[in-house]
Structure formats: C-alpha cells, structure tokens
Amino acid sequence: MDFVIAAPSEFNFELCLGFLQRSPRELLHRWNDGRVRKLLQIGDRPVLFELQEATDSRSTTFPEKGIRVRVLNTTLDEDERAWLERYVRAWFDLDTDLKPFYAKVSNDKLLGDLVTRYHGYRIIGQPDLFESLVWAVLGQQINLAFAYTLKQRFVERFGTSFEFEGHPYYAFPLPGAVAQLSDADLLPLQFSRQKSLYTVTIGKAFATQAITQESLSAMTLAQAKDTLMQIKGIGNWTANYALMKTFRYKDAFPAEDVGIHNAIRLIRNTKQKPTVDEVRRLFKKYKGWEAYATLYLWRSLPS
C-alpha cells in the first residue's frame, strides 16, 4: 500500500532525515539509502511503514512533492490510512507555515544565515506525548550519547517488537507497562534512582489518565506546562521540550538549555555563554517563533 503526503515548498526531507540519523543506537526507526522505516501500533496490530522523498514530477504514480508512504506488512482501511497520514504530518511538522518565521529572521544576526543554510528544516517531533516526556527525562543532566544508550536498553527490554525481512523493529513501551516497573527493573539498565522514579511516575500518570494527550492539546502553552509540572520529575525544561516536540507550540522553548547557550556563544564568537535571563531577553524578538529559533540554533551546533 503506497500513497504520497504532499509537503509545502519550505520542506527539506534530506535535512529532516539527517536529524533522525543522529544515533546508531536509535531503535524506534531504521534508515537506509534515503528511506526511514518505523513501527507503530494502530489499534491492536503492528504496522511497519517506510518513508522516502517523493519529488519526481515525471512520475504518473507519485507526481507530487512530498513524502511517499509505503506500508510494508499489512493493508490499511481508510480510517487507518488517515490516522497514519496524520501521524506522519505531525512527525515531520508538515502543517506549520514557515514563511512568516523566515520573513521575521531573514536579516537576523543570529538566525539569518541559519535559515538560509538549513531552509526547509523542521521540528521532527514525537507525536506521542508519553514518549516525548520519558525521552526528555532520560536526557536530563547527561550527554546525548548516554541518553540514547538508556533509551535503547529501555525500548529493547520493555517495548514491543516485530520482525520483518530479518530485522527487528521496536515500538515504544506503553504507559501501562511502564507504570508496573520499579527500581529493580530500571537500575540494572543504568537508570539513576531519580530517572527510575520519574519514568514510572509518568507511566502511572498516563496509565490512570491523570494526564491525557487529548486534554493537554486543548490547553494554552502556560496551562499545559502548569499541568505537566505537577508530575514529579517534570520541570520547566522538560515540559517545554515535550510540548515543543509533541504539540508544536511555536512559543515553547527551554531557555535553560545548554545547547541554546552554546550555539549563541559560538555564533557570536565569545568566550562567555549568555545567562538564562540574557537568552530570554534575546528571544523576545522571536516572539511566537521561539521553538523554531531554538531548533535552528540547535542545528548550528557541531555534531
């Protein structure tokens, strides 16, 4: 089953795919030769699909610019296909109109060169809020490489898997399963006691529906942040990060993020990083687009 999702002209599949290739320890998707494969649960069954760029205007089968979707292991009915299309659109942030952002920062000293160099780069999201929050907790106060190691162990041990053409594909653990875990399960994976506590607490909040993605989606950024920050282990940085990645609040940005500070220092070619207050003042000129300003600053950092 193949279909194409049309994309706006301000979309660069290659740049977005590059983001997905950051770590060889990533288990939630596989990539090869300009394509990416991902496993999802749709209803009660696994659905493995593959994405690649669709740009050949001479093709009568796939004439549109956008993303070609190929379902590999099953067939989908119309409702399931629509659900998958919504997921892909959210994953690649295809519904955000970047023209106003590019117009705002085209001559900006920090971002002007970056939006030209990385034109079409978008926030590759995590459409599932539970996954986004747990990933943010795993990344707290450790380097990215070790965060990916923790996620790899966590997903292998507690996620669901499906084998196709001799390769295993994994889906993120479900809240109900995570809610049942304890230190005895997570500490052997090199989780700290804090990360273990926070991960299980988030699992319980979603499993009991004390927090639901649907309820937060109807809130303002401030309301959603306040709600999430009632959960132990979710502070301002974690809440902003998750809301930016899942709901695309354009004004969400983790002002305390060390990556933002380092990017500003490097672009300005100064020895001192800006303070959090300085970052907040600087970002006032990006009002309404703070999340995308953050994205392009992150992209400027050396890999």
Image (cartoon, rainbow, N blue to C red):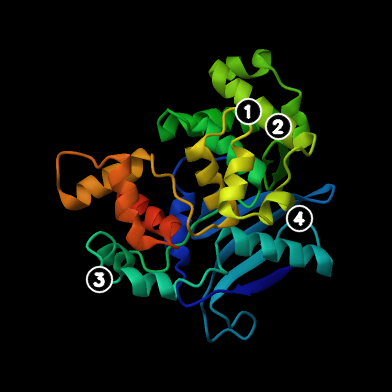
Instruction: Identify whether 14 is placed above or below 239.
Output: below
Q: CA distance from mark 2 to mark 3?
A: 44 Å
Under tag 1, what secondary structure? helix
Q: Which dot marks residue 203?
A: 2
Res 168 seen here: no
Mark 2 or mark 4: whose residue is earlier in sequence: 4
Under tag 4, what secondary structure? loop
Mark nearest the camera among 4 and 3 is 3
Res 186 seen here: yes
Give the amino acid type for the residue marked by disc 2 in the picture: Gly
On the rendered structure, is 183 left or right of 94?
right
Labels 1 & 2 near each other (Cβ < 8 A): yes
Instruction: Pinpoint residue 160: horizontal percent, then vertical percent.
Output: 73, 37
Give the amino acid type for the residue marked by disc 3 in the picture: Asn
Residue linked to disc 3: 107
Mark nearest the camera among 2 and 4 is 2
Give the amino acid type for the residue marked by disc 1 in the picture: Thr
Under tag 2, what secondary structure? helix
Instruction: Identify whether 295 is placed above or below 157.
Output: below
Labels 2 & 3 near each other (Cβ < 8 A): no
Labels 4 & 1 near each other (Cβ < 8 A): no
Where residue 150 sits, quadrant-wise, is top right
| Quadrant occupied by the C terminus | top left
Mark 3 Cα within 10 Å, few/some/many (few <14, many 20+)?
Answer: few
Name the residue furthest left. Answer: 270
Residue linked to disc 4: 73
On the rendered structure, is 280 left or right of 77?
left
Residue linked to disc 1: 199
Mark 1 Cα within 10 Å, few/some/many (few <14, many 20+)?
Answer: many
Q: Residue at x 38, y 40 (%)?
A: 257
Is residue 43 or residue 231 the one in the foreground? 231
